[in-house]
Image: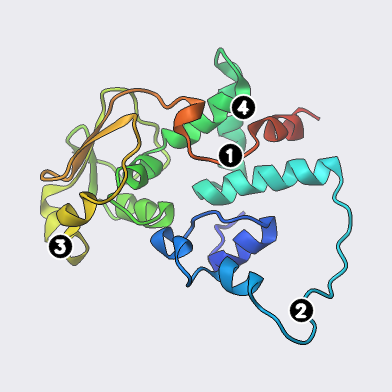
Amino acid sequence: MARYTGPVCKLCRRVGDKLMLKGDRCSSAKCGMERRSAASGPGAGRGRRRKVSERGLQLKEKQKARYSYGVLERQFRKHFAAAGSRPGVTGENLLQILEMRLDNVVYRLGLADSRAQARQLVNHGHITLNGRTTDIASCLVKVGDVVAVKESARKNGYFDGLEKELQRREIASWLALDTEKLSGRVLAAPTRSDIDSRLNEQAIVEYYSR
């Protein structure tokens, strides 16, 4: 299955929830979900809603997770299988794996406005992992790993003024950020309470358990 390249606001409307796919724009009045919900006029609100089955709700939660983290179905299934093989609660393990992806860590550190942008930075070779350039956005980081902007990449216009921007961004508690060096360290594996996600991971587990 190819990666979705259409308007991302459609994905939010499809699952009926904000997925924060456009970074700060999603928190502003420019958010497509906000504009659509405020729409009025002929035909507004006339659609007939069908009752969603339990299976449909489970699928919706799975799709929300996929869209939020920008993961294709095949890769998502691999993450789920890995979560099931670990000790502990499968659903929480799955969210932890998704959070420990390199593209997500770049996003959580504030080095990118969205996960899609973080994935692009990694793919273009602008990010290093423990001092070595990597272009594999899906690779999983470990506790103690250092993620940083490549020295030569700092000449890129995007990184101009990023140091000041980072000072106002909220960084995940399981990460440490050096704004001057544009680098961060993984202090610990995120727990469920560390993940600011409205996903129902149990529904995802039930979806794949049938």
Give the tally of numbered discs: 4
Residue 180 versus residue 44: which sits nearer the camera?
44
Please report whichever mark, 2 or 1, sits nearer to the chain's N-terminal start. 2
Instruction: Give residue 32's quadrant in the image.
Output: bottom right
Q: Nearer the viewer, mark 1 or mark 3?
A: 3
**How far across and how far down the image is residue 20, in percent?**
49, 55
Foreground mark, 2 or 3, reads 2
- N-terminal label among 2 and 3: 2
Report the residue at 58% width, 74% height from top: 35
Q: Residue furthest bottom?
A: 42
Amino acid at the residue labelled 3: Asp
| Mark 2 to mark 3 CA distance (whole Å) | 44 Å
* Disc with the residue nearer the chain's start (1 vs 3): 1
Disc on res. 160: 3
Q: Where residue 111 is drawn, which disc sits there?
A: none
Q: Position of residue 151 (x, y in %)?
A: 11, 48
The amino acid type found where label 4 is placed reads Gly
Q: Residues within 10 Å of mark 1 (few under 14, many from 20)?
A: some
Q: Which residue is mark 4?
A: 91
Q: Secondary structure at mark 1?
A: helix
Kind of residue indicated by mark 2:
Ala
- What residue did someone put label 1 on? 76
Cα gap from disc 1 to disc 3, whole angstroms: 34 Å
Q: Are marks 4 and 1 in contact (CB under 8 Å)?
A: no
Q: Secondary structure at mark 3?
A: loop
Going from N to C along the chain, the mark reached first, 4 or 3, is 4
